[in-house]
Amino acid sequence: MTTTVDEVLPYDEALAAFDPVMGLEVHVELGTNTKMFCGCATTFGAEPNTQVCPVCLGLPGALPVVNAMGVESAIRIGLALNCEIATWCRFARKNYFYPDMPKNFQTSQYDEPIAFNGYLDVEVPGEHGEEPWTYRVEIERAHMEEDTGKSLHVGGSTGRIHGAEYSLVDYNRAGIPLIEIVTKPLTGAGERAPQVARAYVAALRDLLKALDVSDVKMEQGSMRCDVNLSLRPKAGEPTSPEQAAVPLGTRSETKNVNSLRSVERAVRFEICRHAAVLSNGGSIVQETRHFHEDTGATTSGRIKSDADDYRYFPEPDLVPVAPSREWVEELRATLPENPAEHRRRLQTEWGYSDLEMRDVLNAGALDLIERTVAAGASAQSARKWWLGEPSRRANTEALELVAYADQVGLTPAYVAELQSMVDAKRLNDKMARQVLEGVLDGEGAPTAVADARGLELVQDDGALEAAVAKVIEGNPDVADKIRDGKVQAAGALIGQVMKEMKGQADAGKARELILSTLGEG
Amino acid sequence: MTNTTTDLTRATAAQLADLLAAGQVSSVEVTQAHLDRTTAVDEQVHAYLHVAGQSALAEAAEIDRRRAAGEPLHRLAGVPIAVKDVMTTVGMPTTCGSKMLEGWIPPYDATVVAQIKAAGLPILGKVNMDEFAMGSSTEHSAYGPTRNPWDLERIPGGSGGGSSAVVASFQAPLATGTDTGGSIRQPAAVTGSVGTKPTYGGVSRYGLVALASSLDQAGPCARTVLDTALLHEVMGGHDPRDSTSIDAPVPAVVEAAQRADIKGMKIGIVKELTGEGYQAGVSARFEESLQLLVDAGAEIVEVSCPNFRYALAAYYLILPSEASSNLAKFDAMRYGLRVPPTGIDHPSAEQVMAASRDAGFGDEVKRRIILGTYALSSGYYDAYYGTAQKVRRLIANDFDRAFETADVLVSPTAPTTAFRLGEQLDDPMAMYLNDVATIPANLAGVPGMSLPSGLADEDGLPTGLQILAPAMQDQSLYSVGAALEAALTDRWGGPLLDRAPDLTAKGA
């Protein structure tokens, strides 16, 4: 199979002529212990077809039962997205044939979603000197459905079904609860559309994490994004009424874009591709497309037309879901703080500058710092430690800081312990860095590393006094200068004292002692 | 002295239960007697698709052992039963009368089957049915038709013709059935037996291979009203694995069948379900039965259910729609028949699905899948499925209004006695009309029963009377049914089925 390479227009030229409109569909696998309609486990990575039963295998006669936790999670997500919650809604069958779908229909929701009409305010970071920007993403709906099984195509070169010798199907994923969150058409983002898309998916990820409803691991597919994009002729500023009056163009749907960076790149690529087609007088084919991480390009998938007919009808095997208003209000009252507000509050509490806060967020250290502060460290010290050696090493290994810390066993409690040793003057700064390196090298808890490496400030004043006396004696010239009031000269002596003490002395204490001995204390 | 084997197969389930409890017979003897009867007559009747003699006898022996050990047992423990082949059974094939599932042995028991096993009823085997329960004659079974014990050239009703024939030919005292538009009641009517479709949600659907989920309901088949009640009680009750199952105790059906008290009860005749279109002998027996009910102390009132005339049309949109989706799972990917397409070297999954479904499904199944797929299509949904659902609501309203003036409603169960094999096979509409009186109950979810009302003068074949009650008032069916049965049996001088031909004489 040969893949045709699509022509693209440079981004600036595309944006000069066209106004992009996006629609984002995000599928989130809920972190419930059991599947949406049966009692099977949902553990990721289990042996194929070991987490299955008559219900999720679609065996003749089996019937679904709704997972109450799935409904609760859906309502909480809806509330966090400022949605209205249905007083009564049904599941529907979406009928189509595919080998990884056991019943050949997906139990989903159609015209009666559990949550609808919401929004999420998204902070789009300023780049290239732009001001940060808050963009309101209007949410069309959030509905409940079940995941399909997973096909593995064997024998072809591409891993896709085309050219494969045979396919294997793993039904462990079949029936895992999904929430599909669909935005309204997102207009007015203009040239910042790719960043808006990325910022929205990032904000949604943070929100879902805060709700503790999913592990939102895009790389494992527990959060997947479909990017719908269309262009329309430019008629004015992106947010102007003239522009809003222009009808929407034909869209393409890029499926399963599985990282924040890819979301941004997919939007950008599709803008450039659409623009090239439209500029050449062509028209956009309504189709699904695949995004390729390696090239950053999309390629044509299946032609999708309005003739696609899923023959939806209300699922007769399930009774309607009718959450009581009391329950909904109970859930609303226990929602966690919105992540954006949470960040603003922490910044104020911690006294971080905007720049410091940005570095912390970019490093993915917010949660780690919050937990370190909770373990007793000061906000500044927690920031200093996490953004230091651990961040450098995480970068080198191309890992998220959280993942790196997990891997080497560096916990917020350890960082707090390290800082408390500094505060108690058991370690000086340099020694503390060595202890941290020991922890990162897997030598254990900070106290254990300090003990093992023999790193501890000498608390014995006699030893320090002896060292000071020895250094003064060996440097009469310097001592004289200090006696004459040139206090800054003490630095040279402190260095020698520290050397004498093999670094295991409190430099401040050494300075005090030198000055008092020489009558300047 | 008469042959013991014959006696045991002629006994009702209630009588067998008493004999077993009194230690006068063993379950092994009872079970063996029925297996012997099957060996003698089923070559002619063809009620069974699978006879499970060995496991039935093993279950019987286990019950006998437990009884001897003094363990507390269910009243029906040791009384054998036949199971409709639409219910999943561990260790026994479940084909639904289709080539599509030939040889499939389910890894799990339907809830109903589990309840039957828990009560200690040995399962004799799986009985025939129209393919995926689509039909009124069992002629649509991929494994050949079942024949009516009253006349082997005639149909035993359908889809549960195996269930009706197996009890009417004394091969089992009890059988399970399922009723989507009359598949328990119409077969009961044309074979002189009794069958009940409980309130929708009264019996678990878990493990019933679905035809139309919103209409399907499993229920009991037997030769007497009391036996039907006893089995109803075993099958009924809440099942957390079926979301549409009613979370309430089973109505007191056995007590109602034993009391048979209908004094002061108002019995409604549905104007739209009598008169034109009914065979003369069917109407005559129906009228006589009404008089007997009056004699037993009931009051007859006439009610009108004007929307019943749309029931058949609505039913034949809702059923195919749901069926087209329910039957989509038969795709040759995980179980059942797999047929490679001819002339294609490396067929795709889709091509294998298409070839397998083409080979595995019979014409009636394909007809309904096509109808349903069409009715659910975008652009047609509102006109067909949507409208049918509205009609369904109107029919339920008709029932509500009728039950304001009557405690139960009655009608002939089927418009005619058993027709000849092949007679309606090429005329689907004629076949569908058999269910005109039974369908409204499925659309509204209310319970219904059919019991014998006699033999039609013109052909000497059984006629049936249907009783319908408000939802969750299943016990009313049994009060009326038992009272009428007592009066009729009295008039006949014995059970109607005593007049059925002696199959062993004919077959010898």
Image (tube, coloured by chain):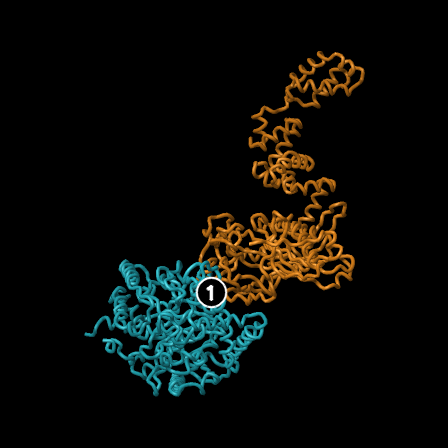
Chain colours: A orange, B cyan
Query: Mark 1 packing: few (<14 Cα in 10 Å), some, or many (20+)?
Result: some
Q: What residue type is labelled 1?
A: Ala
Q: Is residue A243 left or right of residue B503?
A: right
Number of marks: 1
- Residue A517, picture quadrant: top right
Outermost residue on the left side: it is B1
The residue lying at 55 percent from left, 59 percent from top is A145
Picture layout, residue B404 above or below residue A406: below
- Asked which secondary structure carries label 1, the reply is helix
> Could you tell me residue B136's position as x and y percent?
41, 76
> Could you tell me residue B193's position as x and y percent?
35, 76
Which of these two is toward me, A326 or A295?
A295
> Could you tell me residue B390's position as x and y percent?
56, 75
For disc 1, the marked residue is B354
Which of these two is toward me, B63 or B461?
B461
The residue lying at 74 percent from left, 40 percent from top is A353
Image quarter where the N terminus of chain B lies is bottom left
Which of these two is toward me, A433 or A73?
A433
Residue B122 seen in this snapshot: yes
> Disc 1 is attached to a residue of which chain?
B
Picture layout, residue A24 above or below residue B391: above
Picture layout, residue A471 above or below residue B405: above
- Residue B189, picture quadrant: bottom left
Q: Is residue B373 left or right of residue B498?
A: right
Which of these two is toward me, B377 or A125?
B377
Image quarter where the C terminus of chain B lies is bottom left
> Could you tell me residue A367's position as x and y percent?
64, 42
Residue B254 seen in this snapshot: no
